[in-house]
Image (spheres, rainbow, N blue to C red):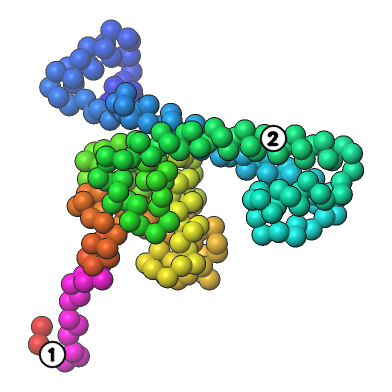
Amino acid sequence: MKLIWQARCKTDPIDARKLADLLRTNLLPAIWVATPTVRAQRTLLRGRAYLVRMRTGVKNRIHGLLTAENHRIEVSEVYGRAGRAWLHTVPLSPMARVQVDLLLEMVDALDERITRLDKRVRRLVKGEPAARRLQTWPGIGTFGAALLLAEIGTIDRFTTSHELAAYAGLIPSTQSSGGKTTHGGVGRAGSPWLMWILIGIVQSLKLAPGPIGHHYLKLLRSKGKAKATVAAARKLCCYLFWCLKEDWSYEQWLQQHESREVRPTQTPGSAA
């Protein structure tokens, strides 16, 4: 393919003939195309994530209005029963009161639509064994398991965990020149939705005891929060690859992870 692109005699009929010859001899590289079922699942789950982001933006707007009015939130859950009662009685300026009431109506409307989509998501993963195994992991719920499976598609198309991490866009860029190698950011390549859900899972696990939290804390001091979070997400992606590949639950994977064979080190001066 690179030779075709660099050819000096380059016309559409010549390129088409060369591509046909490659296809005939099974030498044309092919990409995986999601089935209509997988595409429908992605549409459902991405739509649900979009509504949640919209609801978060509306809630942030309400918090901004309260801050502008110099009000400190006096309840633990603003949008629970006690929080709603406090929001309706807190003294606000007339225009701020109109805005808060309208935004609360939007939150209620989005809650109702998200609940309807959640019912579809639960039906989607109800008979899926891989989704049930993913939900045994801390930090992965029904929506997270469904989105992971939909974005990955089929795990058989990845031969190594490194390939899955690269598909998720969690592999840092590398530049080598003159014997010097530098590593940059992860860039924009890869699946943004898969990266988003993996980093979201890490946000709930990075301060909890376990392999992911341990890996995050080990890198936190030297790399900083952002790089340590991405590195932990990459590690989580590799762990989930083996769980999906070997049909392991979290407990089964943990047993394999903790019982890895460790070669005994030789004592100094012993025979080779």
Provide the residue designation for mark 1: 270
What's the residue type where badge 1 is placed?
Ser
Q: Is residue 45 above or below residue 59?
A: above
SS category of the residue bearing label 1: loop
Q: How many marks?
A: 2
For the residue pair 189 and 67, the one nearer the viewer reads as 67
Residue at image coords 17%, 26%: 27
Q: Residue furthest right?
A: 93
* Three-letter amino acid code at the position of disc 2: Glu
Asked if the residue at tag 2 contacts the one at tag 1, i.e. Cβ–Cβ closer than 8 Å, the answer is no
Viewer-proximal residue, 156 or 23? Answer: 156
Classify residue 54 as left or right of residue 205: right
The answer to whether 125 is drawn above or below residue 183 in the figure is above
The verdict on residue 259 being magenta is yes
Labels 1 and 2: the sequence-earlier one: 2
Image position of 88 (left or right of 59): right
Which residue is at the front of the view, 26 or 32?
32
Write down the quadrant of residue 214 in the picture.
Answer: bottom left
Q: Which mark is residue 105?
A: 2
Q: Which label lies toward us, 1 or 2?
A: 2
Q: Secondary structure at mark 2?
A: helix
Say which residue appears at 71% left-offset and 48% top-offset.
84
Query: Residue at horizontal 17%, vertical 85%?
Result: 266
